[in-house]
Structure formats: C-alpha cells, structure tokens
Image: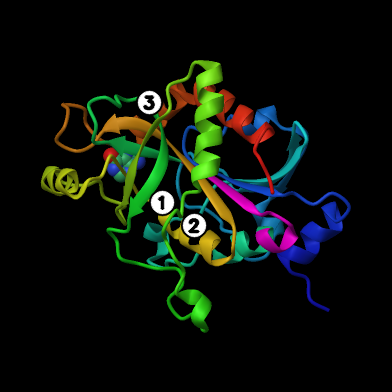
Amino acid sequence: MTDTALDRLRARCADQPPRIAVVLGSGWGGLTARLQDAERIPYAELPGFPVSTVAGHDGALWLGRLGAHRLAVMSGRKHVYETGEADGMKLPLRTLRALGCEVLVQTNAAGSLQPAMPPGSLMAISDHLNLSQRSPLVGEAGSERFVSMVDAYDPALRQHAQTIAQSLGTPLHEGVFAWFLGPQFETPAEIRMMQGFGADAVGMSTVPETIIARHAGMRVLALSLLTNMAAGLSNEQLSHAHTLAQAQAAGDTAGDLLAAILSTLPLS
Ligand code: HPA
C-alpha cells in the first residue's frame, strides 16, 4: 500500500477538501494566524514536500478556512537556487491540485524597479519574464507540456484583488515580475537591462510554481511585497536580513489584504 502526501491529506480532509492553494513568501506568514479551524502539518509528515534551507522560511502546510473557503496554505517553498532543480514544487502543487485546489494564490518578496513602488508597496503580478530560462516541465511527456503562458496570471482574479484592495484603501500596483535564479542578488547592470526589458519587480521564486500550476490547470493569482529598490536604484545594502526586516514591517498590511482577497475569492 502506498502512503503518499495525497493519501495522508485525503485522510485528514476528504469530507471538506480545500479549493484554494496558497504559497506564502517572506512577509506573508501572518496569514496563518488569520485562518479559522487551522491545522498545521509539518512538511516532514508529507512525503515529497520541501524541507527548506532558507532562514525565515517555515516548512509546514496549514489546512484551514477563511470565510466560506477552505484553504491549503504552504508556509515555505522550495527555491530553485537551493538545489538547481526547477521542479522542487511539482509534487506539492500537484498534490494540492489532486486534493481539490483549483486556484493557486502565490505571494513573495521582491525588489522594485519602479520609483512609484517604494519598499513596503504591494504589487499584483500581471505577467512574468522567465529570465532564468529554467522550466519545471523539462522531461514531461505529452502535448500538454506546451502550455500557454498568455494570461498565466488570471485577469479575473487580479480584478478581484484590485476590488478588495480598493475597498480596504490599500494601494495595489500591477506589474511584470522577472525571475532571477539567485541566490545572489542582481547586479546594477542586470537591473538596468531589466528596465529595458519592461520588468517592474525582480525576485527568486514564483515563476516555476506558476508554470506548474498552469500545466495542472489551476488559475493563478500572485502578489509581491516590495521589500527594497532593486540593485543600484538606491543606497540600501541588499541582504537577506534586510529583506526579512522590511517584509516584517509591511506584514500586517499584506496579511490583511491577502486574507480579505482569499475569503471572497470567486471560484467557478
Ligand atoms: N532581488 C531578488 N530577490 C529579492 C529582492 C531583490 O532585490 N528583494 C527581495 N527578494
């Protein structure tokens, strides 16, 4: 008999499976405190879920409720820079899809290329640049691997996020997110190149998960918390500690917005 992460999760919530999967990045962890009927399952209990090597990143799946919706919340993700493998989130996301999640809501911390988005700003990702040119779908068989990336970030979900942000009085920018592999930060020359390429924000995550989710037929909403101006655009020293400190400072606003968006998310 197999004992997969899916078996274990089904045993816990088969009667009321989650319909929304959430991935929490730096600064967004406050969401878990807002969950109702919350249950925390360490990734170590879910075969194939990622054990993170990054300070400040948790490693647990939370099951819980916000409003009428049941959620599966991944607090902690596998980054491609940890191993060089682009498919570290494939098993967890496909498991949540099989469990019943039809939407993936992602969050991250990112660097800003826009003076109008200073540290502490929030941005809904409207499109991405896969600068790393890595794909979690390498090695997949079948024609489904040629997945369209047009409207990869669902326009209707983005519109919903904007409506909620406006009702809360929280500015929510929109922009293009460029994925750099990391773990080193970008050079100022790379950021100047990105300005020419039309990027509004840069980060080291999110794009592989979006590709996995689209391939699995999930709709995607992704939100960035801008923790710093990107390299060369300010005098700040970039560091992981700086990212975490800025993320924590903006965490309440981000958590409130995310909880409000999720509790009323339109599902089909
Ligand atoms: N670059 C890449 N990743 C990041 C940044 C950045 O400036 N800030 C937070 N995550």
Mark toward the viewer: 2 or 1: 2
Which residue is denoted by mark 2 in the rendering? 209
Locate residue 237 relative to residue 151 in the image: left or right. Answer: left
Sooner in the amino-acid sequence: mark 3 or mark 2 = 3
Sequence-wise, the earlier of marks 1 and 3 is: 3
Q: Position of residue 266 (x, y in %)?
A: 66, 40
195 relative to 215 in the view: left or right: left
* Label 1 CB-ligand 1 distance < 8 A: no
**Residue 24 seen by the camera:** no
Would you say the residues marked 2 and 1 are in contact, meaning their CB atoms lie under 8 Å apart?
yes
Quadrant of picture, ligand 1 = top left
Q: Residues within 10 Å of mark 2 (few under 14, many from 20)?
A: many
**Mark 1 burial class by Cα count in 10 Å: few <14, some 14-19, many 20+:** many
Stretch in magenta:
97-107
Q: Residue at x 49, y 30 (%)?
A: 162
Which residue in the protein does label 3 denote?
Answer: 121
Residue at (47, 49) in percent of width and height: 153
Which residue lies under the disc numbered 1? Answer: 205
Q: Residues within 10 Å of mark 3 (few under 14, many from 20)?
A: many
Mark 2 CB in 8 Å range of ligand 1?
no
Mark 2–mark 1 distance (CA, rounded to whole Å)? 8 Å
